[in-house]
Image (cartoon, rainbow, N blue to C red):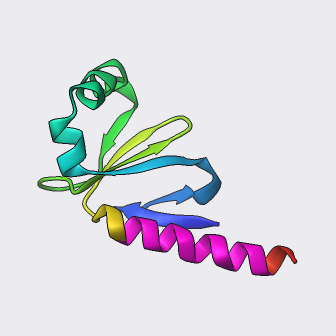
Amino acid sequence: MYIHVGEDVMVRTDEIVAIIDKDTVQFSSELQDFLKTKEKQISNLAKGSYKSLVVTVNHLYLSPLASNTLKKRSKRWSAQENVLNK
């Protein structure tokens, strides 16, 4: 299944490694260093300030959607996927 992470971007739920809120990203020196090393793999989907970082297997997305919203969407799709696969 896919979830919408901002703009016209849909990401497969099974490719999402982490969804991290903006405050955690800003206050973590480790995450700041990680972002610097992955600079070419980052897509800023927020027109202004981003609200969350979506880490996938091959890409990083700065999303205008809150991390709680994205987590709820991913859980909802995971639950639907489990029902469909039974």
Q: Residue at x 34, y 18 (%)?
A: 37
Magenta stretch: helix, strand or loop mostly:
helix
Residue 41: which quarter of the image? top left
For the C terminus, which image quadrant?
A: bottom right
Q: Nearer the viewer, residue 28 or 1?
A: 28
Measuring from the top left, give residue 57's x and y in whole percent.
56, 37
Q: Indicate whether residue 58 is drawn in magenta.
A: no
Measuring from the top left, give residue 39's x and y in whole percent.
31, 25
In the rendered view, does 28 fall on the left or right side of 10? left
| The residue positioned farthest toward the right in the image shown | 86
For the N terminus, which image quadrant?
A: bottom right
Q: Residue at x 75, y 74 (%)?
A: 82
Measuring from the top left, give residue 31's x and y in whole percent.
29, 31
In the rendered view, does 55 fall on the left or right side of 14? left
Look at the picture and state if 20 lies above or below 84.
Answer: above
Residue range (magenta): 69-83
Q: Residue at x 16, y 39 (%)?
A: 26
Q: Nearer the viewer, residue 74 or 23?
A: 23
Q: Residue at x 21, y 50 (%)?
A: 22
Q: Nearer the viewer, residue 49 or 70?
A: 70
